Structure formats: C-alpha cells, structure tokens
Image (tube, grey):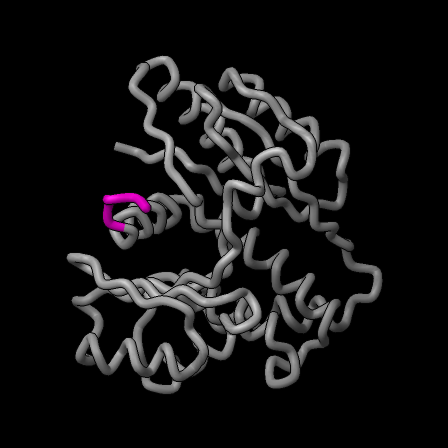
Amino acid sequence: MSGHSKFANIKHKKEKNDAAKGKVFTIIGREIAVAVKEGGPDPANNSRLRDVIAKAKANNMPNDTIERGIKKAAGDASSVNYESVTYEGYGPSGTAIIVRALTDNKNRTAANVRNAFTKGGGNVGTQGCVSYMFDEKGQILIAKEDCDMDADDLMMLALDAGAEDFNEEEDSFEILTSPDDFTAVREALEKESIVMADAQVTMLPQTYVTLSSEDDINNINKTLSLLDDDDDVQEVYHNWEEE
C-alpha cells in the first residue's frame, strides 16, 4: 500500500474539486439520475440513491439541488439516458489507469478518453487489461481531527457493521468493506454522527508504481488532467504513487 496519507490525497482532491464545483455537481447529478432510474426516487428503498446523496452532501451539494435532481429524474421519462462505460489502459512506464464514465454518446466519450491517453503517451487497452491489478472495495476515510471516538471503539463499530479491515494512519482512519457491505457500514457510522472525509466504492491498486522521469510525470498529469476536464468521466483510478 501507499506510504502516503490517503486523507491528504482526498483533501488535495477535494480542494481541487472545490475550484470546479460545477464539474463535481455535474458528475453527482448524473449519478442521481441513474440511481433514480434504476431504483426509484425514494432513498429509503434505494440504497444506491442513499449512497449518492451521502456523496453529494460530502461535496457540499445543496439539499435543494439534490431534491431537484431526484424530482427531475423521477418525473421526466424523456430525460437523457446515461450509459455506464469503463475504459482501461496504460499510462507512461506501464502505469495502469481505469476510467469510468456515464455518457449519452459513447462515440464522443471513447474518442475523448482515447485522446487523453494518447496525449500523455499512453494507450487504451482491452477490457480487463489492467483491472486485475485492482481490488474493488468500499473505502471510508475519517479524519482524526473530525472524530472524537476512541480508535478501538470506532474499529469495533465498523467491524460489527460488516467492515473487512480497519487501518489507522497518522492523520486518519481507513475502513475497507466489500462493495456489497459498503452501504450498511456507511450508514452505521452515519447513525453515530461520524464525519466521513470520503466514502465510496472504489478501485484500490494492489501495488503502486513510482515514476522518476520528468517526462513520464508530465505525461501522466496531462492524461489525468484531460480526463478530469471531461464531463462524461465520473471516476479515474490509477496505480501511480504521486510523490
């Protein structure tokens, strides 16, 4: 695992996202639309929607914006249908990158993703070419500065709710779950008013790659930046260990 603080990485990501809230809200808005279409507009009966609402609140999305998104998705049968697509490929020096997107135009998204890889000196591969290097896990990060609960009590709460693993770092706690148990664990923490810095089902690299060449670092940053700017792209996972 990375020796670097996961919480610091999340904080860095969130700060970057704060500068581009429109992009973040677009991403979450699409996730709300898909969750409502799949499981209905009532969060009590739709665990995926509950998870998206929790993510929206963690990103400071206003409640009325969330409600509008749910109502729009529930009431507009002719609204845009988003398809979920995943791309896998290689960045510089064999770094592994997975891109998840929600799109209403697969040709546009595929062209944009391919362009992002190419401009960074990488290439899109076939399905499965790098995903075997990652594990799909529910990951919950809690900043120590936001948590009054004793570490042992927090660990027992998480494990009793179904968590697989609990790790303590210098500035945070990390809770890992199977994708199926993620919602139950997140909700158990929520009931105890535990503030979560980040909570999502993600792809965790089994091993990390460091890049020493300045060209490689510039190239992977170029790819990640282009993907980040694309409204269709929801999540990007990679095994590059940033210095």
Viewer-nearest residue: 117 or 2: 2
Q: Residue at x 49, y 79 (%)?
A: 184
Q: Does 170 sit above or below residue 218?
A: below
Magenta segment's dominant SS is loop
Image side of residue 117 versus residue 19, left or right: right
Give the quadrant of residue 150.
Answer: bottom left
Q: Does 92 sit above or below residue 150?
A: above
Viewer-nearest residue: 16 or 208: 208
Image side of residue 106 versus residue 235, left or right: right
Q: The C terminus lies in which quarter of the figure?
A: top left
| Residue 108 pos. (x, y %) | 72, 32
Viewer-nearest residue: 150 or 207: 207
Total marks in image? 0
| Residue 180 pos. (x, y %) | 57, 70
Q: Does 112 lie within the magenta span?
A: no
**Bounds of the magenta segment:** 1-5
The residue positioned farthest toward the right in the image shown: 78
Q: Residue at x 47, y 63 (%)?
A: 138
| Residue 236 pos. (x, y %) | 51, 42
Q: Residue at x 77, y 55 (%)?
A: 81
Give the quadrant of residue 28.
Answer: bottom right
Q: Residue at x 35, y 43 (%)?
A: 16
Image side of residue 173 versus residue 101, left or right: left
| Residue 31 pos. (x, y %) | 61, 59
Viewer-nearest residue: 133 or 185: 133
